[in-house]
Amino acid sequence: MSSLRVALVQLKGQPTKKECIANAAAQVRLAKDKGARLIILPECFNSPYSTAEFAHHAEEIPSGVTSQALAKLAGDLGIYLVGGTYPEREGTKLYNTCPVFGPKGELLCRYRKMHLFDMDIPGQCTFRESDALTAGDQLATFTIGTLKIGLGICYDKRFPELTACYRQLGCDMMIFPSAFDPYTGPLHWDLLGRSRALDNQMFVALVSPARDPTTEYVAYGYSLLCDPWGRVLCRAKESQETIIQDIDLKVCEQIKRQIPILKQKRIDIYQLFTKK
């Protein structure tokens, strides 16, 4: 496999979970019709991004209604579907979780947001995920042909060690469903995506909800896909939009030969490793 067609689906929130799922399914089908094999949904695509609403919208994975709908969709279309994120319930705990479904409708993996978004910029953005959610503690990967892909969620991309651990596991792509805010978005969105791509010589996808100024938490938008050179290959705007891009998987190996930073790390002086 030398190339892969990827779709980043930037969705506008809908009044109900049922309508959110229906909207996502319609856009996924359109992306499949355009040849996309890997299709990615945004963070919290089936619920408001609100600590007060997480428990109300939470469900078990993979037995919940959203998971069942995405699994059937992936199986019917024969695609790899990254289900953005939605609130997951396990016992008494809630997680912000990203599931991935394969072309047979199987659950390939799920990733629980590891770094919870607790931020306070007075007058701009205040949010505390830890008021409602539990942090995950496991990395998650899946493969499409020879391409190994790692998962993070939004705030996770601010922690370069996480993406570096995925690179050590052999990932050539990272996916971050993300709901940045309109204040930090212009400052850091492109910068973080490009930096994680350049630092690790990999493709990086950031997939946001569409911007809706009427909601309690307003997402930034501007979903984008970066290549291993740190270049932005494609970018959405603010509204609901699907962007599709063919990625050349040979680029990762070419860059690793041309600028072999992964081999030149001074592990005699510093080292990074995963504990789990």
Image: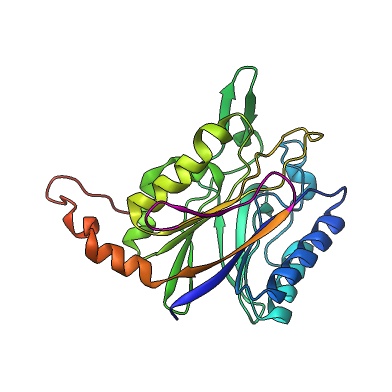
* Figure label count: 0
Q: Residue at x 73, y 81 (%)?
A: 76
Q: Nearer the viewer, residue 10 or 34?
A: 34
Q: Is residue 137 left or right of residue 16?
A: left
- Residue 124 image position (x, y, % from top left): 64, 22
Height in image: 263 above or below 77? Answer: above
Query: Is residue 160 something one can see in this rendering?
Result: yes
Snapshot quadrant of residue 130: top right
- Residue 211 image position (x, y, % from top left): 72, 41
Q: Is residue 228 left or right of residue 154?
A: left
Q: Nearer the viewer, residue 269 or 57?
A: 269
- Residue 66 image position (x, y, % from top left): 76, 62
Check the picture and name the quadrant holding the C terminus. Answer: bottom left
- Residue 97 image position (x, y, % from top left): 61, 54
Render colour scheme = rainbow
Extreme-top residue of the structure: 122
Q: Is residue 242 magenta?
A: no
* Region rendered in magenta: 227-240
Query: Is residue 275 something one can see in this rendering?
Result: no
Q: Is residue 228 magenta?
A: yes
Check the picture and name the quadrant holding the N terminus. Answer: bottom left
Height in image: 56 above or below 214? Answer: below
Q: Residue at x 40, y 64 (%)?
A: 172
Identify the main secondary structure in magenta.
loop
Q: Nearer the viewer, residue 107 or 263?
A: 263
Q: Nearer the viewer, residue 17 or 130?
A: 17
Q: Is residue 177 left or right of residue 168?
A: right
Q: Residue at x 72, y 46 (%)?
A: 210
